[in-house]
Image: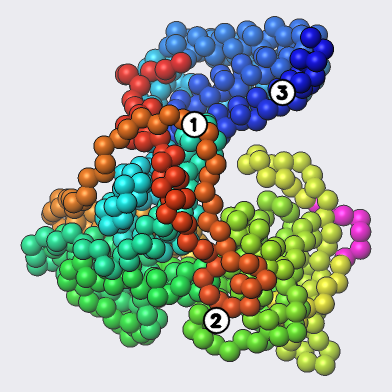
Amino acid sequence: MIRKLAKRGNINDRMDIALNKFKSRMTSYPPGMCPLVMYRSILQMSMNQSCGKCVPCRDGLTEAERLLRIILKGDGNRETLENLKKLCIMIADTADCAVGVVAANTILDSIDEFADEYESHINEQKCVGHSVQTVPCMTLCPAHVDVPGYVACIKNGDYEGAINIIRDRNPFPTACAMVCEHPCEKKCRRSIIDQPINIRGLKKYAVDQVSADSVPIPPANVKTGKTIGIVGGGPSGLTAAYFLALMGHSVEVYDEHEKLGGMLRYGIPEYRLPKARLDEDINAILAAGDIKVHTGVKIGRDVTVDELKSRYDALYLGLGAQLGNRMPVDNANCKNVIPAADFLQAVARGDEIDLTGKNVVLIGGGNVAMDAARTAVRLHAETVHVFTRKRDDYTALETEIESAMQEGVRFRTLLSFLHLEASEEDPENICAVWLQPQIVGEYDKLGFVTTEHSSAYPYRFKCDYLIMGVGQRCDVADFEAAGIPVERGRILADETCMIEGAEGVFSGGDCVTGPSTAINAIAAGQVAAHNIDEYLGYHHKIVCETNPPQAKPNKCIPTGRAEIEERDPFERRKDFKHVELPMTPEEAEREAGRCLRCDHFGCGSMEGGRCAW
């Protein structure tokens, strides 16, 4: 018996293995689920963690779960909710340890955060808006691409079919295969078994096999005689142009750069998105129908907004956030200080920037900051240091931060920016940045840690070149002057992309939301195209000519996730060649085979909008 127990291992070790498997159940909670069901699950888990020594935790949590269950069943009333609130306040005030305190506070938070859900369960005996479980990857993709459909095509070796399914909602399959932040993977149900499917990797495999511009696009509708002007040749504007052209409208695109692509071309480095691959998407878009392009045209200089409004039946403003922000401090306009967005655009244009032997400092932790840091490495900087005030400031993808570290970028956190020190020999250049050490404090309401100044002395760091990765903004001054409503640098448009008070003018993307991702800009262009079509009196539907293969049940056998490998960091840091290596056919087939086909299995509506538990 002793040998048997020793062979199986310590019970706590075995429980840790079981709990690691259980963690994914929470992170893969499907979209559309009732939040009160989720909170009940958290409460039940807390009840199981109670040691049973103090009454508030041992009995109070059990009673709280009973009251919450009554509300979920639709049998509760306002008194039930008030009793639940009073009970949780008592538990939080009197429980001996964190198990009871945190559980009670979690339910109190839910009462504030989801007051509408509680009201609906009490008054209507159902969830708000008839809660339904939706396919996670399709729901979380801003463009709502049929992910299971194109993954199934890849499994069958039908790469053209996969590209067609992607283009049904997103005309940038190649660009998104390279740079998308893949929110579709966030709640992939495959996480319940092992890890999310590498959706972006599979998309990249498909476009690596067949170029997007070699796949026939759907035939355009008969010409409507309507004309639409589009300002901005980036992902949002070109997406709108693609769908509007397929609907039969005539489209003219205006962009101030020499080439189309917007921030995909001028903001994302070549090593992440080779511009020849971006052109494959753009070539296919321009072949969609009657699309004319005017490059090198700046609104306000070469043509006015009023002229565009009078020239077309509708106008779409799809500007990107291409202007980098500067910190409002002395010496911020020195010659060796540059915003990250401006730095990346200068490199993309081919401007000569030689950082050989220089110590480069970068303030900021977003994706643009990581692109700038890795670009500085490739421009032969001696050192590249990234400074942030707190760990939460690193909003870039973990893979981007890891890749930057591999390439030699150094990271320091808990340092807040103070001021810039100008060089005595050359006052037009800075020679150092001053930073104040921080200490961590409490978490705020959004779950981010706060910081405060440490008692340590300010920190002087020698700097030959400073890149400010502190955000971007849109150039909307000329539009505001023309009467387009603007607030805090953003064009005011509703969720249909229509601008109130500007008849026939629509807007979407970064100029409405602020700096965001390519897939969000694409989604805005898609929404705008359909609403412009409706505004013009039509209701065109674009039919995808590819049908996904028939779904087959998955055996749910735990299988490792195929990752996209990258070139050796000591080699790739020397050039701007694409860093990612292609998947092998075996990897792609196996990875696609991990898909659970949630579009057919496991997701569906809950009858009458009532909670299913």
> Mark 1 belongs to which amino acid?
Ile
Please, is residue 276 above or below residue 510 in the view?
below
User: Which x, y percent locates residue 87?
Assistant: 66, 12
Label 3 neighbour load within 10 Å: few <14, some 14-19, many 20+: few
**For residue 369, which quarter of the picture?**
bottom right
Magenta segment range? 452-458
User: Which x, y percent locates residue 453?
Assistant: 84, 55
User: Which x, y percent locates residue 368?
Assistant: 57, 66
Residue highlighted by disc 2: 347
Label 1 neighbour load within 10 Å: few <14, some 14-19, many 20+: few
Q: In the drawing, does residue 529 fall left or right of residue 404?
A: left
Quarter of the picture holding the N terminus: top right
> Residue at coordinates 68% horizontally, 14% vertically from top-left?
48
- Residue 557 numbered tag: 1
User: Which x, y percent locates residue 257?
Assistant: 40, 81
Q: In the drawing, does residue 451 fall left or right of residue 455?
A: left
Circles 2 and 1, Cβ within 8 Å, touching? The answer is no
- Most extreme residue toward the right is 456
Please, is residue 258 above or below residue 36 in the view?
below
> Residue at coordinates 86% horizontally, 72% vertically from top-left?
460
- Most extreme residue toward the bottom is 425
- Residue 14 numbered tag: 3
- Which mark sits nearer the N-terminus, 2 or 1? 2
Circles 2 and 3, Cβ within 8 Å, touching? The answer is no
- Which mark sits nearer the N-terminus, 2 or 3? 3
Distance from disc 2 to disc 3, alpha carbons, whole Å, reads 53 Å
Q: Is residue 428 magenta?
A: no
